[in-house]
Image: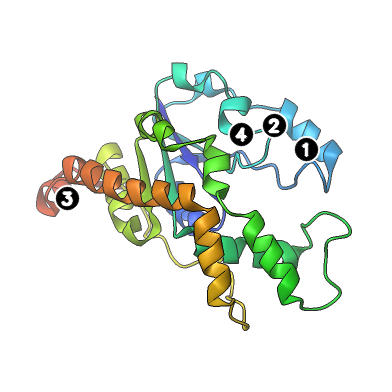
Amino acid sequence: MFYLFHHMPKCGGTSFRNFLQSVFTVHGDYVGTDPQTDPEKFAEFSKKRLNLSQMTEQDCVAGHYNVSGIHLHERYPELERLPHRKFCILRDPFEAAKSGVRYNVKRGLLPKGEMPSDFDMKFLNVQMLRRANYYSRVFGLRSEDDFPALFARYWFIAPLDRLDQAVRMIEQETGRRGKRPGLLNTTRPWQEDFAPELEEEFRERAWLDYRLYDMACLHFGGVAARSLLPSSDAAQGMCTAS
């Protein structure tokens, strides 16, 4: 049995991964590019997969799996047949989209010919709307009917504002106390504000992501309530990870 962190980009996962590294041996499974910017590197990564059958309860795999061709079910079709605990962190879809668009523009990760010569709010609006229902695409969801199967495959999908509970669940499950996650790799917000009309249109287009986010919050509340022992009971069996 092993653990797998499905790292949804721009959802606080980098700081959370630092916590995981204090509890597990973390195996980074990140491509670092996409088919458009570096097709050769992407193809090379696609061919090199981790041997999940050799993982133990001391191991945690971590990767984005957010691009077609290396979505989780494509990269590891055998995953659901192997004993593991899979988890993910999400945040408000509009906030994640803002952070993701800024990151892509700052790093020049957008397709060639799409980078603006200077700050262009119209360009940013287009990029924002392209990220509508980003979560659903990554998870392979087409409708709300797919939610039960998704939640059945994951140990938990936690909202970012309840990261402390996710940390406690992992500590109680493993019996190892880790370093508290800090606020690392935060992407500074735009100095210019997006118009309220853009957020309204984004929410309309990303309705499935918002429904997923709301359901994930509710579902995680139940999972956490069932999983977390009173802090005094949990502390008795806790050791500090080296």
**On the picture, is 220 further left or further right than 45?**
left
Residue 74's x, y, as percent?
62, 26
Residue at coordinates 60% horizontally, 39% vertically from top-left? 65
Circle 4 packing at 10 Å, graded few (<14), some (14-19), many (20+), is some
Eye-nearest disc, 3 or 1 = 1
Disc 3 target residue: 235
Residue matched to label 1: 42
Q: Viewed as shown, does residue 112 lie left or right of 167?
A: right
The colour style of the image is: rainbow
- Alpha-carbon distance for marks 1 and 2? 9 Å
Pick whichever of labels 1 and 2 is earlier in the sequence.
Answer: 1
Q: At label 3, which amino acid type do we have? A: Ala
User: Marks 4/2: CA distance?
Assistant: 6 Å
**What amino acid is at disc 2?**
Gly
- Closer to us: mark 1 or mark 2? 2
Which residue position holds label 4? 71
Q: Which residue is mark 2?
A: 69
Residue at mark 4 to residue at mark 1: CA–CA distance: 13 Å
Q: Earlier in the sequence, mark 2 or mark 3?
A: 2
Q: CA distance from mark 3 to mark 1?
A: 44 Å
**Residue 131: percent from the left, percent from the top?**
62, 55
Distance, label 2 to label 3, CA atoms, is 43 Å
**Label 3's element?**
helix
Q: CA distance from mark 4 to mark 3?
A: 37 Å
Is residue 22 visible in this depiction of the protein? no
Q: Secondary structure at mark 4?
A: loop
